[in-house]
Image (spheres, grey):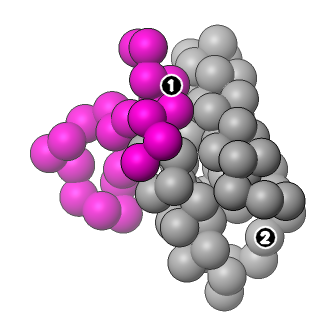
Amino acid sequence: MDKTERVHACYLHACLKWAMRDYLTNSSLRDRFGVEERNKAAISRYIKEAIEAEAIKLYDVDAAPKLRKYVPYWV
């Protein structure tokens, strides 16, 4: 998966979670991509790429890093 596809996948996951009245989290994206706990840094990097591409945004800017939730850019 290249960077563009990862950003799009993060965005679509955020949209799906939003429709389910939930949020994209590191854990939910890790489950979606089938990445093990020990490789969670990769998922954090994918989330960062999606934020930089303005596909998703942080839901609560005051949340602690472990409690961060993300939503689609249009929320």
Is residue 50 visible to us here?
yes
Q: Tag 1, which secondary structure?
A: strand
Residue of label 2: 35
Q: Residue furthest left?
A: 62
Point 78% across, 59% down: residue:
2
Residue range in magenta is: 52-75
Q: Which mark is residue 14?
A: none
Residue of label 1: 72
Which circle's residue, 1 or 2, is located before the other in the chain?
2
Image position, residue 70 (x, y; %): 44, 38
Residue 59 horizontal side relative to residue 1, left or right? left
Q: Tag 2, which secondary structure?
A: loop
Image position, residue 41 (x, y; %): 55, 78
Real-space Cα separation, disc 1 to disc 2, in angstroms: 22 Å
Residue type, numbered disc 1: Pro
Q: Is residue 11 magenta?
A: no
Q: Callout 2: 10 Å neighbours few (<14), some, many (20+)?
A: some
Image position, residue 28 (x, y; %): 65, 49
Q: Judge whether 5 appears above or below 49 on screen.
A: above
Point 35% across, 54% down: residue:
67
Q: Judge whether 7 appears above or below 44 on screen.
A: above
Is residue 70 visible to us here?
no
Point out the image quarter for the N terminus: bottom right
Image position, residue 48 (x, y; %): 46, 57
Q: Is residue 53 magenta?
A: yes
Foreground label between 1 and 2? 1
Point out the image quarter for the C terminus: top left
